[in-house]
Image: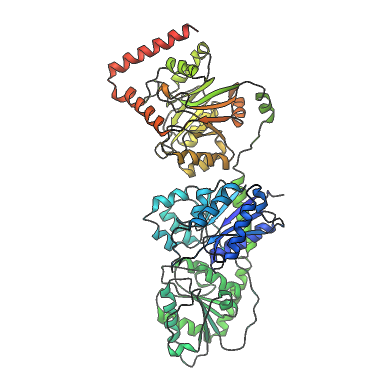
Amino acid sequence: MAERFAIAQVAPHPLEDANEVGTFASEVSKELAARGHRVLLLAPSRNPDLVRESRRLIRAARETPEDLFDPDGGVRVLGVGELLFNTGRKGINPAPPVDIARTIEEVLTHTPLDFVHVHEPWAPSAGSVALRHSRALNVGSFHAPAERVLSTQVARKFVELFFGRMDARTASYEATAELMNRFFPSSYQLLRPGMTPEQRERPEGPPRIAFSDREERGALRLFLRALRLLPEELPWEAVVYSKTGGIPTLRSSLRNRVTVVDDEDAAFASADIVVAASLGQVTAPGVLVKALGVGAVPLAARTPVYEEVLREGDLGLHFQVGDVEVLAQQLERALKDEALRAKLVAAGAEAREALGWTRVTDQVEEIYAGLAALRHDPDPKPEVRARVAKKKLIDVDLHMHTDHSNDCATPVDVLLATAVEVGLGAIAVTDHNEISGAHDAAAKAADYGIKVIVGEEVKTADQGEVIGLFINEKIPRGMTLEETIAEIRRQGGLVYVPHPFDRLHSVPDYEHMLAIVSDIDAIEVFNPRIAIPAFNEEAVRFAAKYRIVGGAGTDGHVAQALGSVRITMRDFDGPEEFLESLRDANIAAKPSSLRYAQVQALKFLQTTAMPPAARRATRRRKVAKAVAGRGGQ
């Protein structure tokens, strides 16, 4: 039986609006719930009663968040706040109101979720808020975002920050994937939208033409101009869906033939032809998908995404963008030629068989299952864990350096003496691209009464640094991340990723982390040398969502740093016991920007500012003091 997940689908637009993004999130949510998954659908709303009831449910579930899911196994729809401002013709919203952001934060922070699936997660939006607060695996779906891509280039770094929290990305169309890759390079899996085939009765009267104003306003003007070019004696009727009700003043020749409605379903229900007349700025491919679903003939501007939906004209008719004469001619042709309409309707009927929501949900489940499979087993070796649980507790630091690193002046003896002085029972010596310091420390460890893990912090070619713990041989710098990990594994060591999201260090990017997630044994979730706390928080999130063991270390380049971070864990012998002990460890730290500044200043004074002769003299004094102390033990 397939694994059942707890899922939050987050849509950007009000629940009451007709749009393909909301339809996608809603239909997939229903299908997932029918398959046994627990599903929340979060979106803004203009319905104050729904918003109030949603907030009541959220408050009631504070003590028992599981209660937020529908007890009958359906989709729990939550209106996360009232969207009272004008969203604009291009759908480019200002920042979500504070009440929406706070409600999303409360739901996603406290509700146990496996996945948060965000749709059009541009910043600012409900989707970007969800990515900010999600502690789950994140899937981002991009539908037809041409206008959003262009409008967000000014805030590109801000947008990339949230995009970097997605574990999988999908695109509804190849044109969308190509555009996204051009501006935000990544891997985008094609996830085409579905449709709900609708039965309709053909009403008496002339053929009906439908238009939806989801595109830019100029498209509606182009459509109305084309209607005016049709022969006066040609019978037809037109219905325009407008959520605002505002359309240009109709000329006398159109007033008796064009009806404006505020219900898109009603506009499409009896349509024979559906027109999408985008000028290339704002496309609405969902209009064409809906046209195919109701058995109408789509007539669309020749934009890449519209051509893709209509399979280069196999399922509908086209005209060049902005060409009102050809649009009028194609309309006249379709109105007069019933055989042509019947042929295209039949082709659309065949396509509908492969465009159902069942097919879409199958793909969504595959994406979820693939990500879930990357999560680590939280208890892979219970027998080892039980053995370790009987051992004494010790304090450990997993990240420190000696003067064998080119950026550290701390002698091995000084490091060991200081570690014992501050009460550490074990340390990992992880010099940069060097293992000799760790071997030296391990050879002297018994004299000081401390355990030393031999390690190395290795610089990869261009994918950041990775630490190998419990290794014996030096690993050369400059290999790929995968090659470096393979060498750690060859030596029987553990793969430990330091400061993984600190953009001020050399770190692997998010996608490289995803590529090696199954090979990571532990991840550094706290490093006091990281100046921006959010970087540590990102590491905590990543470790939690993939169930990776978390570690910590001072990253000490001066002896005074030791003791600011402690992992309290059971004593261990070898890498296997170490890893199982680390699963139940407690991390205690004092994150202080003042302490960070002091330690960094000491590092600068000891390695850069101090003259070489003075550094040598200081080093001799420290070593002599440490050795003298060892002799007195």
Give the side of residue 624 with respect to residue 9, left or right.
left
Q: How is the image coloured?
A: rainbow
Label tally:
0
Residue 358 showing in the rendered view: yes
Tell me: residue 155, above or below residue 380: below
Residue found at x 56% / y 78%: 267
Between residue 287 and residue 240, name the one nearer to us.
Answer: 240
| Residue farthest to the bottom, as pictured | 233
Give the x, y percent position of residue 97.
48, 58
Give the x, y percent position of residue 455.
49, 24
Q: Quadrant of residue 93?
A: bottom left
Q: Quadrant of residue 352?
A: bottom right
Give the side of residue 77 with respect to residue 452, left or right.
right
Residue found at x 39% / y 50%: 157
Give the x, y percent position of residue 337.
54, 85
Tell me: residue 90, above or below residue 491: below
Give the side of residue 351 with respect to residue 443, left or right.
right
Give the x, y percent position of residue 3.
68, 48
Between residue 319 and residue 526, name the one nearer to us.
Answer: 526
Residue 166 showing in the rendered view: no
Residue found at x 68% / y 30%: 382
